[in-house]
């Protein structure tokens, strides 16, 4: 795998982070997460088994433009 299939994008100016997942060669927007709990719910809905366990695994999740687990406004 050349990059993580799940991307948590940089925090927006109003808060929250867009979450995308690469599936079947396309990026799908799962939504905007305002907390780790939101992120886990999105990943669970996308069929990711045990999503809490992969949040800090760079093979699964790439945190862009900010520190991991921070969702406040940029």
Image (tube, rainbow, N blue to C red):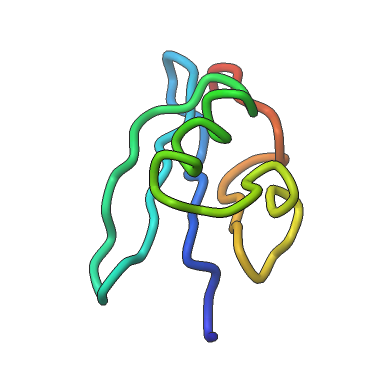
Identify which residue is drawn at 53% across, 25% down: 38
Residue 8 % position (x, y): 51, 45
Q: Name the residue nearer the viewer: 63 or 31.
A: 31
Identify which residue is drawn at 69% across, 48% down: 55
Q: Is residue 71 left or right of residue 17?
A: right
Residue 50 % position (x, y): 65, 48
Identify which residue is drawn at 36% across, 65% down: 22
Q: Quadrant of the C terminus?
A: top right
Residue 30 % position (x, y): 33, 40
Q: Quadrant of the N terminus?
A: bottom right
Identify which residue is drawn at 58% across, 53% down: 49
Q: Is residue 58 left or right of residue 17?
A: right
Q: Name the residue nearer the viewer: 48 or 10.
A: 48
Q: Is residue 16 above or below residue 66?
A: above
Q: Is residue 11 above or below residue 2?
A: above
Residue 62 % position (x, y): 59, 58
Q: Is residue 60 above or below residue 36?
A: below
* Image mark count: 0
């Amino acid at each position: 795998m050349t990059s993580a299939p799940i991307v948590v994008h940089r925090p927006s100016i109003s808060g929250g982070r867009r979450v995308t997942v690469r599936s079947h060669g396309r990026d799908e927007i799962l939504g905007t997460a305002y907390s780790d709990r939101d992120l886990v719910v999105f990943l669970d809905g996308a069929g990711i088994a045990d999503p809490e366990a992969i949040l800090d695994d760079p093979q699964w999740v790439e945190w862009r433009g900010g520190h991991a687990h921070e969702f406040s406004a940029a």
